[in-house]
Amino acid sequence: MDSNSYIKKYQDKQVPLEKAIRDYINPADRIFIDSGLSEPLDLTKKLIELSPELPDIEIIHFLSLSDLEYYKKAGGIEDLFRHNAFFIGKSLRGAVQRGQADYTPMPLSEIPKLFLSGQMHLDTALIQVSPPDQYGFCSYGINVDIVKPLAEAADYVIAEINPNMPRTLGNSFINIADIDAFVVVDRDILEFSYDEPDDIAKKIANYVASLIEDESTIQMGIGQIPNAVTQALMDKKDLGVHSEVFSDGVVDLVEEGIVTCKKKTLHKGKIICSFVMGSRRLYDFVDNNPMIEFHPVEYVNDPYIISQNRKQVAINAALSVDVTGQVNSDSIGHEFYSGIGGQADFVRGAGRAPEGKPIMVLPSTAKLKDGEIVSRIVPNLQPGSGVVIPRHEVHYVVTEWGIAYLYGKNIRERVLQMINIAHPDFRDELLQKAKEWNYIYSDQKLPKSVEGRISVYPEKYETTLDLSNEETIKIRPIKPTDERLIQELLYSLNEKDRYYRFFTPVKAFRHKTVSPMVIIDYSTSMILVGVHEKNEVKKIIAEGGFFSTNKPSVAEIAFAVHPDWRGLGITKFLLNYLVQIARELNYKAFTGTILLENKAMLHIIDSADYPLTVRRIEGGVTEFKMDITKE
């Protein structure tokens, strides 16, 4: 049979809109309205129109995106409906904040069992589906999420059958025989678009992309920044997608050959999702596409299922994060704003996946209604703000100022990491609060210029160095968060090495000794470190720097390399790179003192491409001055 044949076979179920509502909905019923961009608008409008005759109805929503207004009724009746939102969309946000609608905080994966178990009885589900195929199956289309299980749990199912609804594949069908009543509509499916990412969103997206390895499987939560990440992935290879939702950006990645799903460990070759939000182009892409499988959220968002994807990356947006790593994503103080959605599911699943990476993203600041700029990195969450992701499950937090890695870190380390990615205008305030609460050393400082301004980390100097031992290390400026790593490097040096470096056999490298080595004014000094990372374990294996002296154009240099990483050209590279940076800061010469027995360092200086204008030997040491002005 074709589609029209099935509709004719079940023509007794095709009813006028008003009859569909009157025959299957009674006062005080609990009604589910299809999610997101699949909202059955004709049925919903008729329900609103007839609401004076149907008092005390409770409407269940997950992410309402239409512009229908449920509370502006003729005659001023505003309490006929009571909404219960599992995720607060734009059309219900005001009602929730006014107390006219309810919000139920719950991980997306767990919502279906509330209804399937009978804990919440559901009288009627209003859904929108594609026309039946030759076997009588209608597709739930672009929203399967909680729609399929809730339709199965409802006493009655009323459907809009719309030929414009894509026929999506997977566990995404309902037979027309299981629909109690339907109306046929011919209306465009609602569309959705994110604003074009601004410079801050692009910078955050680039940081996130730097964490995503080839062959990773990605999830992108709802929000401008997670969506912007797709534009920053064009240099990746063989990515997969396992995500409760995706948008048009994934279409670009598939068409460019970036997303192939060939290396996935679960559902190889398939994009797995539960709903999509986007344009008609996206809907045409998912229509009858065997590469895309839609499944209900109790499967897609099950942390156990998610964790089976090797290199699963979860990218989700936060509203605010405190300095210890507690993430608030659903409220602004006491005002509920959005919801938990799939965030908790995917953070947990990705955190347990082999080589998985849960990533929280947010701009460092927000602009309030009165124009005031506030920090989103806060000492403590606002009263009323919910902890959607507890601090122990947070791995990465990314702002436009950098990446904080918190997993397994103590409170002091977390605080320094978070201050490091906060907006510079708020770092002093965060530091003082952390000191007040004894989270950090009482003498902890931040990098500042001689004028007292925060010295911003110079990201532009980050680079990589390929070594002859087939390892690659990251070369970057030192950060205040490197204190422990520098201590580990210095303790790796033997007594002779320490004597070469400090001219005395230093026994201990306590906080007061090391702190000045990691907190510098980047506008007058520079320390570069070589960082080796394996399995998310980072080690500083080399450091070299120049420091201002009492002569404005002359800087003093010093180096240290871990014993296991010598003879690979690291010091020579650091020297050349430091010369380049020093020239930018208007230095004309490097100076230093080397023990005569330190043959390796003497060789570096003598073989450098920069002439020595001073070479003085006295008391077992060589003092030198190196002209760095000539290319």
Image (tube, rainbow, N blue to C red):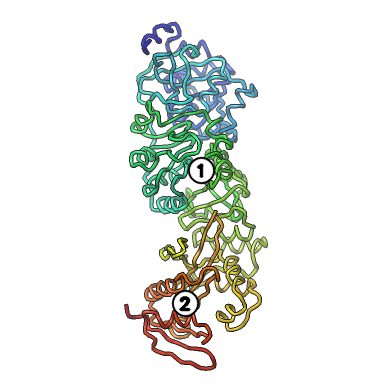
As drawn, the residue found furthest toward the right would be: 438
Mark 1 or mark 2: which comes first in sequence? 1
- The total number of labels drawn is 2
Which SS class for mark 1? strand
Q: Position of residue 95 (x, y in %)?
A: 53, 33
Q: Mark 2 points at which residue?
A: 546
- The residues tagged by marks 1 and 2 sit, at their Cα atoms, a distance apart of 41 Å
Image quarter (top left, top right, bottom left or bottom right) of the C terminus: bottom left
Q: Mark 1 points at which residue?
A: 312
* Residue 3 left/right relative to 527: left
Q: Residue at x 49, y 66 (%)?
A: 530
Question: Can residue 98 be seen in this snapshot?
Answer: no
Q: Where is residue 418 in the image (x, y as percent from the top left)?
A: 55, 57
As drawn, the residue found furthest toward the bottom would be: 618
Q: Using the image, determine if residue 302 lies above or below residue 360.
A: above
Q: Position of residue 190 (x, y in %)?
A: 39, 29
